[in-house]
Amino acid sequence: MPEKKAAGKPKPQRPAKKPAKKHQAKRAPVRARTRKSVPTNQPAAAAERSRLSVLMIASEAHPYAKTGGLAEVAAALPDALGRLGHDVTLVLPRYRGIDVSGAARQSVQVPLGASIQPVTFHRRVERQGVTVVFVDIPDLFDRDGLYGVNGADYPDNAWRFAMFSRAALEYARIRGERPSIIHTHDWQTALVPVFQKMLFSPDPTVGGVPAVFTIHNLAFQGVFPASIVPMLGLGWEVMHVDALEYWGSASYMKGGINFSERITTVSPTYAKEILTPELGMGLDGALRRRANDLAGILNGIDVERWDPSNDPFVGQSYDASDLSGKAAAKAVLLKTVGLEPSSSPVIGLISRLTDQKGFDIIAAAMDELITFDAAWVMLGSGERQYEDMWRSLAARYPRRVSATIGFDERLAHRIEAGADLFLMPSRFEPCGLNQMYSLRYGTVPIVRATGGLADTVVEARAPGGNGIRFTDYSPAALVDAVRRALELYRNPKLWKQLQQTGMAADFSWDASAREYVKVYESAAAAARENR
């Protein structure tokens, strides 16, 4: 099924320069006040608790809708949990083009504040242990993009995702099956635990269910004017520093942090980084207060979709024991992008073209980088200045540079398989998936040691080395890292060792899913103790 691509990804939001006190209630933290004991309609025996029922709510998931790594997680994690014997109900918006054939349909009226919204739920069992529910609200989600168009967010995103969050809880209430855990992702669903605590504490189905909130990228926070609060049916008490209040505005992300029993993010290093002012994006104080409830769990990858021994896109299969097919994959890549066959190394990039992804230092270093004996294949889109830079490079160096603006699944696979090196010089990177795809395909990554990049890539000459790392966020450090990588490429024995070490790593979702289960079980155990 084709994915729905977003025409506009939500813009990162950074702290305001001056605090504003308007609407800030001088009351005790809401999260602490609203933990209540509620009746349960599930048996409490340990045998019954071993099989978890997870209500997972996300704004996108592959293959239905995708703008980035969240969609990969929201697809792969439910599948992995299902393989471990748990039950997952994944709730998603029904965006334009999503096929709901074969789904059971139920139409309801969902209240939110003073509004009543007609909603249709489409429920379909997709795989063993995984049921998907599409929340169908055409006025809000039958649009060209997921979050916006032409580089601008939709002006009603605050309302769109508040209504989606409220509708997801209503689905669970109507269904009447009490979940073990409610798991939400990023700002778009961060109001779920807020509504749960503030509106449904006594509810027999969703009240008192432990909530887990996963931060995929703290730069995108869902910060809106405080005037949204009464529209959400919430009182002004949520405009407290320990609730949603954020420099006089309402932060959905902060609500998810403060109202959830457990918080996770997508790599151990990023979990540490977001506790600092440098990478906490103005929420480091809130996160430090919840540090004991915060865990970093490295994302996995879909090892069936990304498998060089069985990838229909790359021309010829190969594995760590026989890398000969990688040369054929390189030839396929070069032919695909219109570059001449060459023995020079190919450096691949697949990325959003933004400062976060390191394109400011790439731009500053490019005059020197382009002098190296290497070809460049770039796939991505983003800020106009960087799109224009790559178009210009491809025009000036047509035999050595290919730039494809946009996204192409087939080309993405061919870059991972056919490139010799893969560049990810991110300013910050919560987890990153492409470095793991690269390692799996024997394509040696060059990364800045931040977030999940630091957790997955080991410097070449260190024990277990599988790539090239640099620390300073500067053009000079980037140039030095690329130069070192090209020197290593000219040492075939060491290069093959790097490739095989990377390909031996296990980045499957099964290990990550077990870590999430530990978080779920810890939250559930604490909830039982508090009854």
Image (cartoon, rainbow, N blue to C red):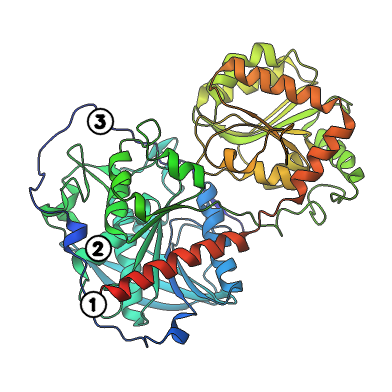
Check disc 1 and give the amino acid type.
Answer: Asp
Which residue position holds label 2? 195
Q: Give the distance between the C-alpha atoms of the residues marked 3 and 2, in whole angstroms.
A: 26 Å
Residue 507 on image: x %, y %: 66, 53
Tell me if label 3 and label 2 are in contact, CB under 8 Å: no
Residue 429 on image: x %, y %: 52, 38
Q: Residues within 10 Å of mark 3 (few under 14, many from 20)?
A: few
* Label 3 vs 2, first from the N-terminus: 3
The dot on residue 172 is none
Which residue position holds label 1? 203
Left or right position of 356 against 454: left
* Label 3 vs 1, first from the N-terminus: 3
Can residue 37 be spotted in the picture?
yes
Q: Give the distance between the C-alpha atoms of the residues marked 1 and 2, in whole angstroms.
A: 11 Å
Front residue of this view, candidates 127 and 193:
193
Check disc 3 and give the amino acid type.
Answer: Ala
- The answer to which image quadrant residue 165 occupies is bottom left
In this picture, is 475 found above or below 59?
Answer: above
Can residue 137 be spotted in the picture?
no
Residue 300 on image: x %, y %: 60, 54
Q: Residues within 10 Å of mark 1 (few under 14, many from 20)?
A: some
Left or right position of 306 against 246: right
Left or right position of 409 against 25: right
The dot on residue 16 is 3
Check disc 2 and give the amino acid type.
Answer: Phe
Residue displayed at 28% across by 45% down: 286
Residue 444 on image: x %, y %: 74, 36
Q: Which corner quadrant holds the C terminus?
A: bottom left
Q: Residues within 10 Å of mark 2 (few under 14, many from 20)?
A: many
